[in-house]
Image (tube, helix red, strand yellow):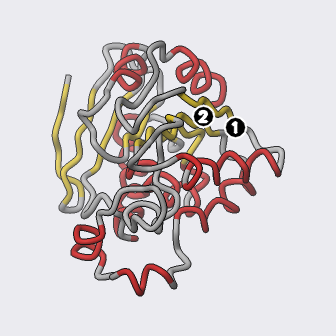
Amino acid sequence: MRETIELNGREVIIIHPEKPNGKWALKTEYFDAFPEVQNILSGMGYYIVHIKNQTRWHLPSDTEARAELAQYMSERFNVSKKCVIIGMSCGGMQGIYFASKYPELVSCMYLDAPVVNLLSCPGGLGKGSSFLEEFSAHTGMGLGELLAYRNHPLDHLPALVAHNIPIILVSGDSDTVVPYDENGKYINDSYTENNGTIKTIIKKGADHHPHGLADNSPIIDFILKYDI
C-alpha cells in the first residue's frame, strides 16, 4: 500500500510492506526512479519512505526533516530509528549530509553514482555536468562562492568513516554526469585508507543511468548483513 501524508509541512511517501519486519529504508531523492532495490526490500518487510526535499541540491533543513521523519517512523510503526539509506546521484549527496550529522539514525548506505564533489557536479569544472544555474537558484551560491565552499559532501566523509557506517557504492566507470573519479572515488578511498566497511562495484562501460545492477543481489545481501 502506498500512503501519502504531510509531516511538518512536507509531503511524505510511505510504502507499507505486507509483512513488516520492523525495519525501513529511506530513499532520499527521485523516489519513483530505478525502484528495483526498494521493491525487493519492500517484499522482505521493509517500509520504504521518502520525504520531499526543498531542493535536490540539499539545504540543511532537508537534513533536519529526515531526523524528524525518523522519530515519526519509530513512534508510528514501531520500527528502528535507524534506516537504510538509498541514495542515487543527488540523493547520495543528501544521504551523506544526513548520515554524517545523524549517524545514530543510519544503519548502512547504498550509494549509487553519488554527488560528492560539487565542483564536479553541479559545478562542471572537471568532467562532470554543469547544473550551475539550477544550483544557484536553489542555494544562492554562484561559482565564486562554490570555489571557496567547505561544505561539500566530501568534507563530511570523515564523520562517516569515524562512525564506520557501512556503505555499498555502485558507479559506472563512464559516467559523464557524476564521474566516479571526481566523486564516488573519494568515498572508496576514504574508507579503504581507514579500514572502513565498504563494498565498491564499478560497472564497466556504464554511464550515469541506469542506476542499480542487472542483478541487485549484492546490494540486497550487503544491506541485510549490515542493517542491524
Disc 2 versus disc 1: distance between alpha carbons?
Answer: 6 Å
Q: Residue at x 82, y 50 (%)?
A: 193
What residue sits right under mark 2 in the picture?
168
Kindly state the secondary structure of the residue where label 1 is placed.
Answer: strand
Kindly state the secondary structure of the residue where label 2 is placed.
Answer: strand
What residue sits right under mark 1 in the picture?
198
Q: Is residue 110 above or below residue 135?
A: above
Q: Is residue 170 left or right of residue 14?
A: right
The one nearer the camera, 82 or 196, is: 196
The one nearer the camera, 23 or 185, is: 185
Q: Amino acid at mark 1?
A: Ile
Could you tell me if residue 118 is visible in this image? Answer: yes
Q: Residue at x 40, y 20 (%)?
A: 20
Q: Residue at x 46, y 34 (%)?
A: 79
Q: Which mark is residue 8?
A: none
Q: Quadrant of the N terminus?
A: top left
Image location of residue 129, percent across then percent down: 36, 56
- Circles 2 and 1, Cβ within 8 Å, touching? The answer is yes
Q: Residue at x 18, y 62 (%)?
A: 9
